[in-house]
Image (tube, helix red, strand yellow):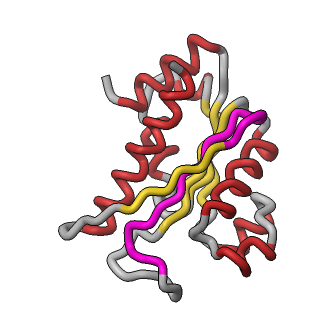
Amino acid sequence: MKDEEKTVKLLREKGLTLATAESCTGGLIAKRITDVSGSSAVFECGIVSYSNRIKREILGVREKTLEEHGAVSEECAKEMVQGVLKLSGADLAVAVTGIAGPKSDNTDKPVGLVYIAFSDGKNTLVREYRNNFSVDVRNSNRNKTADEAFKIILESLL
């Protein structure tokens, strides 16, 4: 059984809902969840907040956070997950931000740097990943990030 199938099954069993806020994965996590039949019972929404404007205006990421830490940061991921949780009313949320590549953004942050945040409304955790792919860099980074997000969600459900 795929991780997204396990996620939907466990969310249903526990009567919980999930929302996502995605930047570098461009909605891949939401896509994988909604590929599962029955996901409408547990999936509230997915926000693809690719621009900083959407991170600010929709998810409530503070301008100060973006200026001081950047969009690819632990602080931004934390505010993204808290924002989508509040916006959606879901029980759980996951947020991802990072540099998929193949080129970096206009900072000194490396391609493959990713932050994944998870929150249940009471506790929020953020994990940093540093992927280092040499082939199909963009897709590899996006798929690996989605895989890791599902692992974090499943850890919380088990």
Instruction: Work out which quarter of the rendered image holds the N terminus and state it.
Output: top left
Up-down relation of residue 78 to residue 54 (above or below): above
Left or right, 54 with reference to 21: right
Up-down relation of residue 22 to residue 18 (above or below): below
Residue 119 at x, y = what percent?
Answer: 67, 39
Question: Residue at 61% across / 23% down in the picture?
Answer: 41
Question: Residue at 77% across / 34% down in the picture?
Answer: 122
Check if residue 77 falls in the magenta segment.
no
Left or right, 110 with reference to 91: left
Question: Residue at 48% across / 85% down in the picture?
Answer: 108
Q: Quadrant of residue 40?
A: top right
Up-down relation of residue 23 to residue 156 (above or below): below
Residue 78 at x, y = what percent?
Answer: 68, 54
Residue 117 at x, y = what percent?
Answer: 60, 49
Residue 79 at x, y = what percent?
Answer: 73, 57
Check if residue 114 falls in the magenta segment.
yes
Tell me which segment is drawn in magenta. 109-124
In the image, 129 versus 62, the foreground residue is 129
